[in-house]
Image (tube, rainbow, N blue to C red):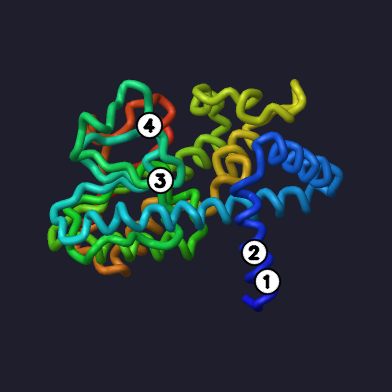
Amino acid sequence: MLCGEKWMHSVYRAGKAVLPKWVKIIVNRRIQQRIDVLPEPVRVAIRNLSNEIQIARMVEYSAKSFEALRDRKWLKVQLGCGRDIKLGWVNIDLARWIPSGIDLAAHSDTILIGYDLRRGLPLEEGSCDIIYSEHFFEHLEYRYGIGLMRDCYRALCPGGIFRIVLPNMKGCFDAYLRGDWHYFDLIDIFDTQPKIEPGTDTLIDQINYGVYQHGEHKWCYDEEKLVKVLQWIGYSSVISSSYQKEMDSDEPTRLRYSFYMEAVK
């Protein structure tokens, strides 16, 4: 950064720190008004950039949490936990959701870290006993997903387990080809896709929702692909699994539209 830019940046930060709250509100409103008149693609780009800046700050804040785990062994780690906080585990997600009824202060062995897992898993080699993920890797672009799977392998101890649960797209495609409306009856397409005009819905709408989910899904896996990838990474054993009550969500849509896999280092 040039000297002039450094000076301007310092002035901006100092001014922001001392400005009255009402001034900040007015400035933010004027900025938002200017953004609102921009074309939608530009507004989306601005929102995405703002999100990425916030995520970068979150990563900085998380460094101390990961440092506190240094030299720890036999960790149980959940990736992309969302609101499903597993007690006694290290739970990692972009958003630090703490469900009502869970008092983290009363569970000193339960850790919640806000972190961008596209950057990998900053845990020491051989420090984890089990790494678990449910309906998360489909939200990562392929290169990030494979990179994170490789990092999980590195972080697991010998004999450690990587358990992953993903959307069962093969089941959805099979039901689509059979014309099986009953298979999708747990999903209200007009609730998930409110822009669909009444009377125009078909099974392809369910496929579009399952595959894309409003742009949140970035990649589809099936069991064959996942086995080949995990074997290529180096896991000694990769097998199909089934629902495990003590581990997996019992939410009806998860039970019907998921497949389960376990890999051993």
| Snapshot quadrant of residue 2 | bottom right
Q: Earlier in the sequence, mark 1 or mark 4?
A: 1
Which mark lies nearer to you, 3 or 4? Answer: 4
Name the residue located 13 percent from the left edge and 58 percent from the top edge. Answer: 159
Kind of residue sitting beneath label 2: His
Secondary structure beneath disc 3? Answer: strand
Secondary structure beneath disc 2? Answer: helix
Label 1, label 3: how far apart the Cα atoms are: 34 Å
Q: Is residue 163 left or right of residue 46?
A: left
Q: Is residue 260 visible?
A: no
Q: Which residue in the protein does label 3 denote?
A: 93
Q: Which mark is residue 57?
A: none
Provide residue 152's location: percent of width, then percent of height.
29, 60
Q: Is residue 142 left or right of residue 43?
A: left
Mark 2, Cα crowd under 10 Å, few <14 / some 14-19 / many 20+, is few
Q: Which residue in the protein does label 2 denote?
A: 9
User: Given contact means CB atoms under 8 Å apart, are the residues at marks 1 and 2 in contact?
Assistant: yes
Q: Earlier in the sequence, mark 3 or mark 4?
A: 3
Kind of residue sitting beneath label 4: Ile
Which mark lies nearer to you, 2 or 4? Answer: 2
Provide residue 8's location: percent of width, then percent of height.
68, 66
| Snapshot quadrant of residue 195 | top right
Q: Which residue in the protein does label 4 denote?
A: 98
Q: Earlier in the sequence, mark 2 or mark 4?
A: 2
Q: Is residue 81 above or below residue 153?
A: above
Name the residue located 37 percent from the left edge and 41 percent from the top edge. Answer: 81
Provide residue 20's location: percent of width, then percent of height.
66, 39
Q: Which residue in the protein does label 1 denote?
A: 5
Count of numbered tags: 4
Kind of residue sitting beneath label 3: Asp
